[in-house]
Structure formats: C-alpha cells, structure tokens
Image (cartoon, helix red, strand yellow):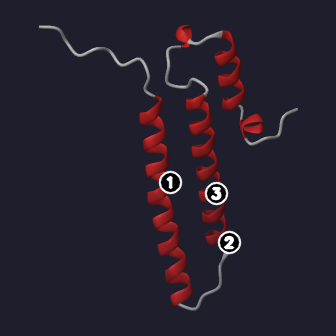
C-alpha cells in the first residue's frame, strides 16, 4: 500500500480560512451596527475602531490571496526566481496594495 501523495501547495487552505474569518467578522460587524442603529445610538469611537479593524482584516485577506497566487504555500525551493520576486512583492503590504516605491 502506498500512502497519499504529499500535497506541495497549501495556499488554498490559507485563503479559504482567511476569507471565512472575514465573512464571520463582517457578520459580527453588521450585527453590531444593527443593534447600534436599533437602539438609536450614534456610532461611538469603539464602533469606528471596530470598522477600521474589519477593513484592515479584509485588506490583509486580499494581500494573502495575492501572495498565494504569487507562490505562498509552495515550498520556497520549488519557486522560480521570478516567482520568488513576485512572492516578496505580494507579501509586502505597500506593494500588494499598489503603493510601489
């Protein structure tokens, strides 16, 4: 009997978990905003901080997704030099969000 082949690429799992957690977090955000509006309270500092944190989490998930497409999840030795360069560019938040220096 032979065992299952070793999977060389785990990036899809990272992306799936990242987006799943963002969806759950957005559910909590919508619930929080709904209860705030329902109670006829204005958005306070903690609500704004929560919204900013969710925006950062969404941006981080997008960055990870782009990094996976550039090679995150593969063994580094299996990446070509151009893929290694793309990976490092996608891993840098400034570059991944379009702010190249």
Residue that extends furthest to the bottom in the rendered view of this protein: 40
| Residue found 65% across the figure and 24% down from its top | 87
Distance from the alpha carbon under mark 3 to that under mark 2 = 15 Å
| Badge number at residue 22 | 1
Residue position for label 2: 45
Of mark 3 and mark 2, the one earlier in the sequence is: 2
From the image, state whether disc 3 or disc 2 is nearer to you: 3
Q: Pointer 1: residues within 10 angstroms few (<14), some, or many (20+)?
A: some
Q: Pointer 3: residues within 10 angstroms few (<14), some, or many (20+)?
A: some
| Residue found 68% across the figure and 31% down from its top | 90
* Circle 2/circle 1 CB separation < 8 Å: no
| Badge number at residue 69 | none
| Badge number at residue 55 | 3
| Residue found 44% across the figure and 22% down from its top | 9
In the rendered image, which quarter contains the N terminus? Answer: top left
From the image, state whether disc 2 or disc 1 is nearer to you: 1
Disc 1 is placed on an element classified as: helix
Q: Pointer 2: residues within 10 angstroms few (<14), some, or many (20+)?
A: few
Q: Is residue 98 above or below residue 55?
A: above
């Amino acid at each position: 009997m032979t065992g299952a082949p070793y999977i060389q690429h785990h990036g899809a799992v990272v992306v799936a978990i990242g987006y799943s957690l963002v969806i759950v977090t957005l559910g909590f955000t919508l619930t929080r905003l709904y209860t705030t509006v329902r109670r006829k309270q204005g958005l306070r500092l903690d609500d704004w901080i929560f919204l900013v944190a969710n925006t950062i989490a969404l941006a981080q998930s997008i960055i990870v997704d782009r990094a996976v497409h550039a090679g995150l999840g593969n063994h580094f030795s299996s990446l070509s030099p151009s893929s290694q360069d793309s990976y490092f560019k996608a891993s840098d938040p400034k570059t991944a969000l379009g702010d190249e220096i």
